[in-house]
Each structure stands twice: as C-alpha cells, then as structure tokens.
Image: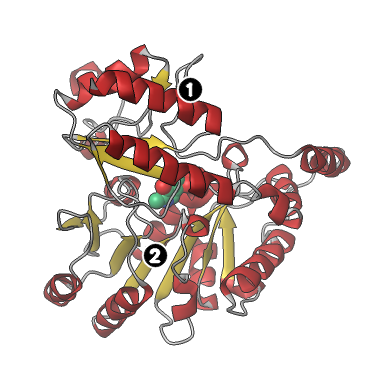
Amino acid sequence: MVQSQWPYWLPLREDLRNISPYGAPQIEGVIALNTNENPFPLPQEVVAAMSERLSSVIADLNRYPDREATGLRTKLAHYISLTTGVEVSTENIWAANGSNEILQTLFLACGGGETLALGFTPSYSVHPLIAQITKTPWFAGSRDEDFRIDIAKAKKLIREKSPQLVFITTPNNPSGSSTSISDLKELAEATGSIGGLLIVDEAYAEFSDEPSAVTLLADFPHVVVVRTMSKAFAFAGARAGYLVAKPAVVHAARVTRLPYHLSALTQVAAETALEFAPAMQSEIELLIAERERVANAIVEVGFRVVPSSANFLLFSGFTGETGAIWQSFLDRGILIRDIGLRGFLRVTIGTPAENEQFIAALREIAE
Ligand SMILES: *Cc1c(COP(=O)(O)O)cnc(C)c1O
C-alpha cells in the first residue's frame, strides 16, 4: 500500500505512510534460495523428540509460559559457552521470537528520540527499518568496494557522530564478508569512549571461522552480541533468537519486551533443538563446501563473487538490469534475492541438488 491508498479514517503515523512492509517474495513451487535458510529439514530423531516434548506441554497451554524463559536461556548459555569458549550464564542471555525481535527490544530500550544509531551499509536492512519504526535517527556509514569496513574511518565517524547504538553485522548480510575480531575490538573501544552500545549481529557466526564478539564481553561491557537459530541451526520456522551481553542489558530487555512474549511451544521446541545441537547443525560443513563449489561456478562463467563466510554469495558482473537477471533465474524456477543493490544479486546455498540447478541456470544466463 502506498500513501494515497490509506483510508482517511486510519490514524496511521505520518512517518509510516510510505514504508512498505519488509519481506522477500514467498513463491510456491520454485527453488527458494532467497532468505538464507538452511535447506535441510530437521533430522528424524529431532522431529520425534520435539513432537513428544511439545505434546507434553499442550495440555498446559491454559497457563502463561515462563516469562523469563529460564530453561531455554540456560541451554543457550551452555551452547554459547561450549562454542565460543567464553563461560556465560543464564543472566547473560535474553531470548525472543527471532533475532529481529531482539533487535526491536534493544531499540525500544536504548533508541528513540534524540538517540542516534549508526550502521555500515550495505548491510542488514532491518536495522534501519526498526530504527525508523522506533523513531531512532539512523546514520548510514559506508563500506569500501569489497564491502569491508575501513576501521580508521569508522572510528572517526563514531567519534564525530557519537551514536548511542552502533551496528555491525558479521559475517555481513548481503555481502558475506567478515569483520575481524581485532577490528571489532577497535570499534568496541571507540564506541565505549563515547558511551555507546556496540551491537554485533552474528546471525551467520556458525558458518565463519572468526572468533565471536562474545570474546570481547569481559573487557567491553557495552558489547551486545545478537544471534539467531534461524540460519545455521535450521530453525527459521520456529522463530528463536537471542542476545549475549552483560546482565544489565538483559534487565533492560526485560523492561521493553512484551509480557509472556515467548510462547511455551517455542521455548520447548528451541530447548529440544539445543539438546540436539550437533544433529541440527550437521550440514554446516557440507553447506560451506557447497558455498565454495557455487562460488567457483560463478567465477567460471565470468561473473564476480564476494568472498563469503556465510551461507550465501553476493555476485555481480552480469550484463543487463539486475531485476531482469533476477527474473531470468525465476523463469528457470530459481528464486534468488535482489537486495536493491544495482549490479548485485544474492543467492543462498541450498542442497547439492538445488545448487546444481542454480549452476545450470547460471550457465544459461551467462551465455
Ligand atoms: C536473518 C537475519 C536475522 C534475523 O533472523 P531471525 O532470528 O529469523 O529474526 C538477523 N540478522 C541478520 C543479519 C540476518 O541475516
């Protein structure tokens, strides 16, 4: 809907009248390589265990869920301690319906009004979107041609603008490029010196070899790491995301979350998924190998690809309009992502068979 179509009787906020709802096309009957999901269904043993656990809570759905999601947060703390080597506890974790809700909770707690939020684009477009919805002014810093952040420039920008919220997505979406932990440390120092919060969105961390920003928490209390179970964990449909931070940040999140925001079903499903973490993530190695295979195929047809530490690839070098190339893939039954960056398209790594079909379409289109 655009502005002129809003009915006269709807007192919609003036500043929201021209915003389109966020979302990629959801199209039936195509190979969907457009939203960075893990393409593999849950393993049978997990389906069985989850079904059993879910049916045991259904009779209790007359009651509100645990407002604090303590069981789930304890399991997330264990998972983070195990995978990052940093000992964290339940009080360092907050969980919500996807990391998008975590981001919104943070914006509601620390944004709004005079607060400035800073990001480095192109990056995850939901950050500025939630900024706008929560009336938080957003400043878009830039990345270089390789989609890397120039750290000296970034530090200068942080000192000049004094943003209360600084967003870094690493590995970055849509480029797949990483910010090194030493660069993050410099950004944490700069953000700390002006009294801001450094929010590191690690939605794709499990696909990357770079140490997590969780390792910075001991020295930098103002670092917040945002994670999701939607990508590597193959759990996008369940909606489970979380943050790792100092307990004060968790307390702040409690103030702005909605009461009973995380359903009993979600809590139990996510707890079960975490108990089966190795099984849930068993395809990560294969997806990384497939990423390299697809990247090589893209280069072989004469296109360019950005080196990626995630489960997707950003490519360029095609001739013709970006939208037309996107349509050429769709005409061949492959749905990829036009992220609004002229000359670039993003493809999620699928199953080997899906990737094969993507490569076949790629070869035809490149001819
Ligand atoms: C996919 C994605 C998310 C959102 O994940 P949900 O947990 O499904 O809400 C957050 N940040 C980035 C960078 C993403 O790509």
In the image, 58 versus 256, the foreground residue is 58
Q: Residue at x 28, y 75 (%)?
A: 187
How far separated are the C-alphas under marks 1 and 2? Answer: 31 Å
Choose top left, top right, bottom left or bottom right for residue 51. Answer: top right
The amino acid type, in three-letter code, at marker 2 is: Val
Which residue is denoted by mark 2 in the rendering? 200
Would residue 213 appear left or right of 142 to someone viewing this image? Answer: right
User: Which element carries disc 2, helix, strand or loop?
Assistant: strand
The location of residue 47, given as percent across then percent down, is: 78, 38
Residue for badge 1:
31
Residue drawn at x 73%, y 46% is 269
The secondary element bearing badge 1 is classed as: strand
The reply to whether callout 1 and callout 2 are in contact (CB within 8 Å) is: no
Left or right for 325, reference 265: left
Q: In the image, residue 216 lies at what x, y percent?
A: 44, 80
Q: Seen in the image, is 335 located left or right of residue 31?
A: left
